[in-house]
Amino acid sequence: MHRPSSHCCGAMMNFSKLRRAIAHEAARLMYFRQESEYFQAKNKAARQLCKGWVKPADLPSNTEIREAVQSFARLLEGESRLNALRDMRLTALRVMRLLSKFHPRLIGSVYTGHVRTGSDIDIHIFSDSIEVVLGCLDCEGLPYEVERKQVRKNGENATYTHVHLREAFDVELTIYRENLRSYGFKSSITGKRIEGATLPQLEDFLAEVYPDVQVEQELASMEVQGDPYRVFYSLLVPLENVKQHPKYHPEGDVLYHSLQVYDHACDAIPYDEEFLLAALLHDVGKGIDPKNHVDAGLEALDGFITDRTAWLIAHHMDTHKIIDGSIGARAHRRLRENESYDELILLGKCDRAGRVSGIETTTLEDALSYLQSLSD
C-alpha cells in the first residue's frame, strides 16, 4: 500500500522548514512536560503539524529537539537558569560525597548543562544491595522514595530501581549492580556512550567551570541552612502509618487528612504560603507524640517555619472550641487580637472539612513542589 510522502504535508512547507517545525513543536511538548520521551514527542508533533504520514528519516533527531528545548529554556528562564544549574551541580556534589562508597556518577542534563525548569539531578550508583544504600540514606537523614520501573530495552525486559531524594533539587538515584561499573551506558539522544562524572571528576569540573565559586563554603552553607522542604517531607511521610480514631477521623491516616486540609486551604487562599504550610503541617506532631501533638510538631518545625505559621499551628485546636462555642471569653479575645485570626478560623474549618473517606487529594510531592514554588 502506497503511503504519501512527508512532502505531502503541505505545499507551503518545504522539507527543512517542516523538520524545524516538528523539532520546535516536540521541544515545546517536552519543555512543558506534556511528553517526556523524544520518540513520542516528535511523533505527536508530526501528527499535529501534518495530516499525512511522515517518514521516520524525515523526523528531527533527538539532538535537534534537545537544542530546541534549550532555546525554550534560554528564552523563558534567562539568567536564573544558569544560577539554578550551578546550584544543581553543587547539590549533586554534596549527594555524591555522602554516597561516595557507591562510586556515584553524575550524568544527564545537570552534567551537560542542558537543564530546564523541572529537571532533576541524575546520579548512577553501584551496589549489590539496595538495602545497604537505603541504610546509608537513613543514616544521613535523607528522605527518599523507592521506585521500581519495568523497562523494555533491546528486546528484553528489565527492572530498574530508582531512589528519589528531596534535596534543594529533586535527585534521582539509579542503582546498578557492582559488576556494571565498567558497562557502557548509551545516551538516548546521541547514541554514544555515557561516561558521566565521577566524584573526583566533578570536583575538577566545578573548579574549572566556576573558578570564582568557593565550593566548600557553598556546601557548608547548604549544610547549615538546610532545606526546610526536606524537613517537611521527612515529618509528613510517616503520617501515612499513623491511624486516627474512626469516630472523629473516618478518613483514616493523618497524612491523608493533612492533604485534604491542604486542598481546602488551597481552594480558599491559594497564594498564602504561610497559611498553606500551616494547613499541611498542623498535625505532624501526631507522628512524634500523639498525646501532645501540637507542642511536639512545633518543636520539630522550630527554625523552619515563620512565626505566623507557628501561631496558626499552635492554636488550630482552639478553633474547634471557637466553632462550637466552648472557648472562654478571655482566651477568645486574645486570639481575636491577632491579625491572622480570620485565617485561624478558616484553618479550623478546613481541618473539619478534611475528614472524608475515599476522595482524591493532591499528592504530597505536588503539594510541597507548589509550596516551594511560592517560596521561590
Image (cartoon, helix red, strand yellow):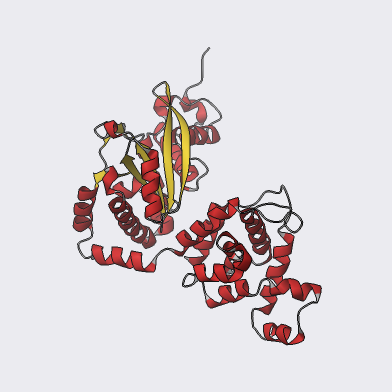
Say which residue appears at 41% left-offset and 54% top-offset: 142
The x, y position of residue 4, in whole percent, is: 51, 21
Drawn side of residue 59 relative to residue 311, left or right: left
Looking at this view, is 331 or 174 the one in front? 331
Say which residue appears at 56% left-offset and 57% top-offset: 367
Q: Is residue 362 shown to the viewer in this render? A: yes
The x, y position of residue 99, in whole percent, is: 31, 49
Say which residue appears at 36% left-offset and 62% top-offset: 79
Looking at this view, is 330 or 12 the one in front? 330
166 lies above or below 344: above
Q: Residue furthest right?
A: 325
Looking at this view, is 14 or 317 the one in front? 317
The x, y position of residue 11, in whole percent, is: 49, 31
Drawn side of residue 146 relative to residue 185, left or right: right
Q: How many marks?
A: 0
Say which residue appears at 36% left-offset and 44% top-offset: 133
Q: Is residue 66 shown to the viewer in this render? A: no
The x, y position of residue 192, in whole percent, is: 28, 33
318 lies above or below 181: below
323 lies above or below 372: below
